[in-house]
Amino acid sequence: MTDIVTIIGIAVGGDGVGKLSDGRVVFVPRTAPGDRIRLREGSLQRHRSYARAELGELVAPGPGRVTPPCPHYVNDHCGGCQLQHLAYDEQLKAKRAIVGETLRRLGKLKLEDPEIVEALDEWRYGSKISMAAKGGEGAAKAVGLHPYDRPNFVFPLADCHITDFRLMALWRELRGRLALLPQPLTRLTLRLDRDERRHIIAESAGEPWLNADELRRALLGSVDGAIVCWWQPVDGAARVVAGPATGFPATAFEQVNPGMGMITRRWAVEQLGDVRSQTVWDLYGGIGDTAALLIERGANVVSVDADEKAVSWGRARLPAARFIAAKAEDVLPSLPPPHAVVLNPPPAGLHWDVSLRLTSDPAPKVVYISCDPATLARDLQRLNVNYLVKEVRAFDLFPQTAHVETVAVLEAA
């Protein structure tokens, strides 16, 4: 019989944190602060300074524990969400603590836990879902998600409670027609764009998707709205194979929670103050959503992103901005000096050359929109030689998951 462990917090990634009798920290998935638990027999894995284990018995629940509504979360150990067992207020509290602790520990910043902006919707907010396919002869045997404790396994998805109803309606019709997808299927992504078109992006390692029109015709009678089918070869570029090839590029990055993404960007841009007639860099600018807000405020915008499709679409909708399709670190020397800079990098954070440029010739104001507190902390530590962190605010773009968006506001020292 294992000792009883009390969970005291939530770690980056969503695992509960407790302490073993030897004082070692232990990480236990699907546990909540205040839970008193027994570890599952044989699950404890000891490392030099920490341990990992699985929940065996819930001796007494913590005050913030709730019953998860999604059957996949309970029965299939779905890894898409990490916090469905926490009441929403507890999720927000955990995310504030994750950001604050990470910035203090890794970034060496003397900051309190930041304010967090709660989500507009706790459920059905996702405009995109990406599923793995489990192989078999002919059509894939299972298309769905991975359990958190068996990452190489795929369970068939019936419904995802954080994904928009309109995509799940498409999925219900598509599930019975998997044989019409390219084979062998490796990944299937469904996406809802801002014009309410549904996109089916099928990745396969075999021949091109030749019967996409047949699938599209079969779906049009049962699914509302336009449908666009994309085929993506493994390690290749996706292309439209059925439906209109113009409009929103479904393979370009866009926040899975568009409404909260707009709230986040708008707050970030407001922190720059008066930018009328000033040059503002929009680095990692994607399809130009931040550029559009800057143009509204009268800025001269230079938007840089490595995704050519995203840049092309942004350029067509925002002729007032200058769009450049390139890696930010490659073109910074050729850009006009900025009055302000907006950074919105991928999870890996800033390339070292971007950090070096910003510290060697500081811009008066910088806002950094981050999807990873750890890389944000690292980059802020690099930038703090010439910048002061004036404010940090978190935004809950991904309820029920451990992910959190953070905006840091910097001014040249």
Image (cartoon, rainbow, N blue to C red):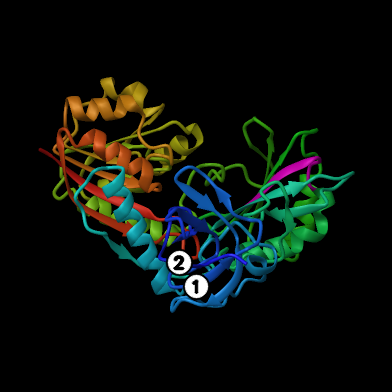
Q: CA distance from mark 1 to mark 2?
A: 7 Å
Indicate whether residue 309 is drawn in magenta.
no
Q: Nearer the viewer, residue 401 or 244?
A: 401
Q: Name the residue beneath numbered marker 1.
A: 36
The residue positioned 18% from the left and 48% from the top of the image is 272
Quarter of the image holding residue 175?
bottom right
Left/right placement of residue 85 relative to residue 155 reads: left
- Which disc number belongs to residue 7? 2
The residue positioned 74% from the left and 48% from the top of the image is 133
Helix, strand or loop at label 1? It is strand
In terms of sequence position, does the residue under pointer 1 or pointer 2 come before the other? Answer: 2
The residue positioned 63% from the left and 36% from the top of the image is 238
Residue 74: where, in percent of width, then height? 65, 69
Question: The disc labelled 2 sits on which kind of residue?
Answer: Ile
Q: Is residue 37 above or below residue 212?
A: below
Magenta span: chief secondary structure: strand
Question: The disc labelled 1 sits on which kind of residue?
Answer: Arg
Residue 129: where, in percent of width, then height? 60, 55
Helix, strand or loop at label 2? It is loop
Left/right placement of residue 341 relative to residue 178 reads: left
Region of the chain picked out in magenta, as a range = 181-190
